[in-house]
Amino acid sequence: MNTAMNAYQDHFVEHAMQLPGFDSVSVRVSRQEAMQRFMQSGFPTQRLENWKHTSVTALWKRAYKPSEPGCMGLDPDDITPYLADRRGVYRLVFVNGLFSRPLSDLHDLPVGVRVASMAQLVNDSPCEVEPYLGNHTPGNDQGFSDLNHALWGDGAFVHLPSGTRLEKPLHLLYLSTISREPMVAMPRNVVVAGTDAHAQIVESYASLGQARHFTNAHTTLVLGEKARVRHLLLLQESLVAHHVGTMRATQMGDSCLDSQLFSMGGELTRQELHVTLAGERAECSLDGLFIAGGGQHMDFHTSMHHTSPDTWSRQLYKGVLDGNARGVFNGVVRVPPGIHHTRSNQTSANLLLSDTAEIDTKPQLEINTDAVQCSHGATVGSLDPEALFYLQSRGLNVTSARLLLIKGFAEEVLQRVKPTLLQAWVGQSLNLGVKQS
Amino acid sequence: MNILEVRNLHVSVMNKPILRGLELHLKPGEVHAIMGPNGSGKSTLANVLAGRGDYQVTAGEILYQGQELLSMAPEDRARAGLFLAFQNPVEIPGVSNVRLLKEAFNAHQRYRRLPEMDAMAFRAYLNERTKSLELSEDWLLRPVNAGFSGGEKKRNELLQMMVLEPHLAILDEIDSGLDIDALAKVAAGINALRDTKRSMLLITHYPRLLEQVPPDKVHVLIGGQIVLCGGLDLAGQLEERGYGWLF
Ligand SMILES: Nc1ncnc2c1ncn2[C@@H]1O[C@H](COP(=O)(O)OP(=O)(O)O)[C@@H](O)[C@H]1O
Ligand SMILES: [Mg+2]
């Protein structure tokens, strides 16, 4: 592991001047601190409670090289399959982690709304982004976040001033291409919704062909008072890709975050979602669906911190596992002492399609107060043989019957995606996912 | 040729004999009723005809349209025109009625080497049938049987039958859980499908349904065998006297 860590450190030292934000003291210091922490904690090992089901040895053994500019020869047609819509959506496209202006489209952005490449902005106008580029709660299991904070190469910066509305969804597309040497992309995204601002953000990660690459993404969401944000996260990278992603959201009073995660790709995928309900009456709804087959390993960790009274959260995570796939769901809901009148619900439901697929699911409550309403539960099951026979008796062969039941299982999460344009788009990518597994 | 020939059928469930030498012959266009006390094996017969697993056929044979039925997969039986309206239809959350009907209908079309119906035409085809059954507007979008009352489930089975237009329909207690009005609608639906070629097997406890859908024959199934055969009057007798006198 040391060799892999040293390679990142060497890169950090050699390329320090090329990393975005070099001229900003605070950004430089923050990168240095993050690098130091990474060198201390290293890649997480299975001895850490939060990583006990997931080994990242295969990840660091594959000597990924940070991507460099100059490897983007894509034209708009190449990205069509990855787009929800050409016209009805704003988009910011990143290829191998770096912003591509020709592939992006920000026509008719409402006045005042800032959508930009993080790398450009931190060089051109650092004071706009500096407040959001500090390091987040360090932990000895946060090696990947530290690595991202040390080495991020680009990302999206979205700022919605008070009262602004993004009527069309904003699609942040991260595409990785096939390269001679396996590449790592480390996007760092920041979305800030001011007081009473509304936005729909789509964050999707995909590969061109069977690219062997690694994405280590970090996304910060800040919701001001009364802000409403819909967030759709789509992980559909190649079956030989590695993906580690962290989303951290902080919500002020009366804000509302509605986030859906769909994961179909990757050989190894780990996604963390951490939400802090920091203002009274903040509401958060998290849904997830993962479809894993073959030898895929998918691991989802959520933590929901009710640090203010009268806050509300719900979570529904569903897994479909086939072949030798391995799934992990771990969700923690935390209510500290003295925080009253919170409500939370957390459900994990899993469908095993083969005898060799496995799921470890653990919804947890850490509640230190009485005045709460919390419920949680987890189920693991296989396809209902009665339902299969019923469909066969209507003329469907076993394959179609199974597919229909799997889609039926997924439907509940899919239904939560709004608007219909995005729901239909996700539905299409899901079908592929189901067939593939 | 008979559409259905059941000869000396013996079936066990978990090594317990349920059907013991059952005989049944059905001609095209005929409607037969099977009556019998609870646990006599009526649903077992229906399930074996539809091809459900976990039943062991220990002796006998079944011919459907002259073909050996027991070697056919359940979906092939369905595509060949055999339809079972289940006594307890399963709930399938997340799968809408329209989705199921479309897939089922198209599977039948492909089997008959007919083109799939386009979306508009299929919608019209469905609407005609939901209207005649007086089903609510959102019926087709609701998940299959999920949260349906007993009576709604039965009407949903009937809708599927009207869409798939089978050659042999086996209706397992389609009348249970229906009030008088709903029963009249269901009976009208069944009668509308009655013609000189389509055969039906009505499994029921009550003569009420049979009064509205008069069968050509009534069989009484007790202890896994047909013990008595007769006309519609037999159904009335059974209602008056119960099954005790037949043991
Ligand atoms: N899947 C099954 N598993 C166990 N026992 C069954 C099953 N199906 C039927 N049986 C048994 O077989 C007998 C006949 O049941 P059934 O055919 O449902 O009767 P009926 O429909 O006439 O009421 C009953 O004793 C019932 O308990
Ligand atoms: Mg029965």
Image (cartoon, coloured by chain):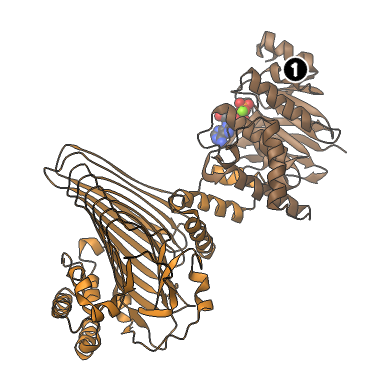
Check disc 1: other Cα within 10 Å, few if <14, some if 14-19, many if 20+: some
- Find the residue positioned furthest to the top: B240
- Residue drawn where x is 17% and y is 75% of the image: A34
Please state the quadrant of the image where ligand 2 appears. top right
Residue A239: x percent and y percent?
A: 44, 72
Q: Which chain is orange?
A: A
B64 relative to A124, above or below:
above
For this rendering, which residue is in front, B143 or A298?
B143
A16 relative to A309, above or below:
below
Residue A394: x percent and y percent?
A: 66, 44
Q: Assign the N terminus of chain A to one quadrant of the image.
A: bottom left
Query: What is the chain letter for disc 1?
Result: B
For this rendering, which residue is in front, A362 or A249?
A249
| Residue B139 sits in quarter | top right
**Image side of residue B167 versus residue A185, left or right:** right
**Image side of residue A12 versus residue A180, left or right:** left
- Find the residue positioned furthest to the left: A338
For this rendering, which residue is in front, A182 or B171?
A182
For this rendering, which residue is in front, A114 or A183?
A114
Local secondary structure at mark 1: helix
Q: Which residue is mark 1?
A: B211
Residue B111 visible in the current orientation: yes
- Find the residue positioned furthest to the front: A111
Residue A337: x percent and y percent?
A: 11, 44
Q: Amino acid at mark 1?
A: Glu
**Image side of residue A218 versus residue A176, left or right:** left
Residue A378: x percent and y percent?
A: 34, 47
Q: Colour of chain B?
A: brown
A321 relative to B85, above or below:
below
